[in-house]
Every structure is written in structure tokens, then in C-alpha cells.
Amino acid sequence: MEFQQILGFYHVVKLQSFTGAAEATGRSQSALSQQIKALEEEFECRLIERAGKRYLGLSLQGEIFFSFAESVVRGSRQCRESLEAIKKSRRGRLRIAAPFTTLYHLLPEAVKQFMAEFPQVELTLLDRPQSVVVDLVRSGDIDLGLALEKSAPRDLETLRWKEVETVVIVPPGHPLCALQPVSLEHLAKFPLILPPRRVQHVGRILLEEQFREMGIDYRIIMESGNVELSAMYVEMGLGITCASMVWGLPRLSARKLCFLSLGHLFNPEFICLVTRKDKARSVAMQAFVQLLLQNERGGI
């Protein structure tokens, strides 16, 4: 018993015509008659009552077999529809925004895997500060944002991804390397490289608030919103910088730098996947999120 035999039988019964069934299945009437005959020989009973090539009706056995054929054809259609739905879901677009450092250190491997698995999805990556990432998620201009948890308001959906810690970055042999733990008074003794004083750079705001509360004088020698740029000037000996990061950044680890924890001064943070609560996740988006959760290497 083959599927084409079942399909031919089904159409003969539904259309009550060998001629109509032949047209519907793209076969000759002779070939269709041979298929029915082969089924009847296999089951050793007559399934269709006919006079020559004229359809007369079903035998008792034919009615039983038609119920089976109907379920097979229906199942075949449902299967085809499901496969087509999956195929369509692997198209479309996925828009993601994240700060430069996250894009640079965390996403390359996941993006590479996603592009291989979803070549027909139009992927867009935007390099944006955290506050802009949040605004883009809220407005619906992007599907997925990556930002620190403290930057995401409660009206958005957040999923914790990687824990980050506040550190001070200094050159090897710097006096702070011999001081553990590092205090705010210790930090203020050296020129600081900090992000620009803008809302999206919450870390600088918190640091300066603590300096002011403790009456500590400090000097900012450079403003930079890019940790790679700041690290380069730290390596040159211009000053020291603070950053929120995941331990083990491969590209930063290659520089001649020391990373000293400030976890005793600042609570740990988390990079979160940020989405709108009222927006359903596409298959492509769910797949990308799973790739991120599986790839636990790198840092922000």
C-alpha cells in the first residue's frame, strides 16, 4: 500500500468519478484504475463498486478503507501546512540593539550561528547607548535589546543573561594593585578616565555621588564612553578607569592591564535581554535568545 494509491482512492470516492480523480491527481484513468485494483488485490476484497470505468459506490470494506484514507490525506495536509509554517517563520526580520562593547565582545559567535541557521531572516544590529536601546525597545523600533538591568524600566520584559562587576582598570605595577580592597579615597588619588556625564552613563553618576557624599576631591583627565578606548589610554599611563564588565574579556585580556574588583563598593549588575511585554516572540527571536543563553563566553 502506497500513499499515491491511498490518494487516488480518496479522490475517486470524493469526486465519485474516475475521470475527475485522474485530473485531480495528474494521472491517467488507466493508471488510477490500476492503483485501485492493486489495493483490492492487496486486501483481497472489492473496495469500489463500478461498471467499467463508471463509479457506482463503495462496498462495506470500501467504506472502512475510506475512513482510513480520509485520515491519511487529512494528516498529510496538516503536516504540509505545519512544515510550510515553519519555513515561513524562518523568514522575516530581527532587529537588535546593544551598546558597542556588548556587540563587540558578546554577540559575534551567536550572530554567526544565527546567520547560518536563519539565512533568510533579515538581521539588523544597532550600536546604541543603553538608554537609547531601552527607548528603541519601548517604541517597537527594535525587537530585542541588550542593556544593564538598572537601565530597563519595569514596563519592559527583562531576562537576566550575564552578571557584570564594577572594576577599576589600571596598568600592571600600578600602586592600586598592592591595595586590596581598593577604596574611593584610593581611586581619587589618580587621574580618572570616565564616561561623559550623560544619563546613560549611570556608573559615573553613582561614582561621583559617592565622591561628593564623602567630600573627596577627584580629577577627570579624559571622558570616553568606550571601554576599549579608555583601556588603551590606561595602558599608555594617562589615567585609570572604572567599568562594568564580565570577567575574561578576550580582547581586553590581551592588553597589558590589571582589573581590580570594586564589588565591595558597588552591587553586582546583570546584562539583560530586554523586550516589550505585549510583543510576541517570533521563532527567529526565540532561536537567537537560545543561542545567547548557550554561549556563555566573553563579556561586555
Image: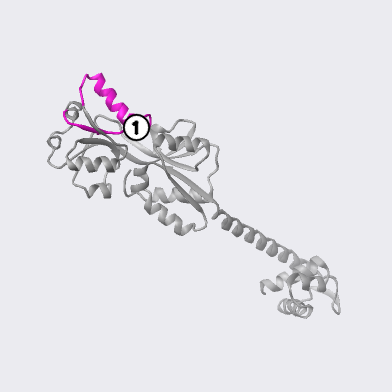
- Give the image location of residue 235, x and y in percent: 19, 43
Q: Identify residue type, mark 1.
A: His
- Give the image location of residue 241, x and y in percent: 23, 36
Q: Where on the picture, by quarter, is residue 271?
A: top left
Q: Residue at x 66, y 63 (%)?
A: 76
**Seen in the image, is 232 located left or right of residue 176?**
right
Q: Residues within 10 Å of mark 1 (few under 14, many from 20)?
A: some
**Seen in the image, is 35 located left or right of residue 262?**
right
226 above or below 61?
A: above
Q: Residue at x 43, y 33 (%)?
A: 152
The residue where tag 1 is placed is 201
Depth check: give the residue in front, 252 or 66. Answer: 252
108 above or below 77?
A: above
The secondary element bearing badge 1 is classed as loop
Q: Which residues are magenta?
A: 189-218
* Residue 65 magenta-highlighted: no
The quarter of the picture where the N terminus appears is bottom right
The quarter of the picture where the C terminus appears is top left
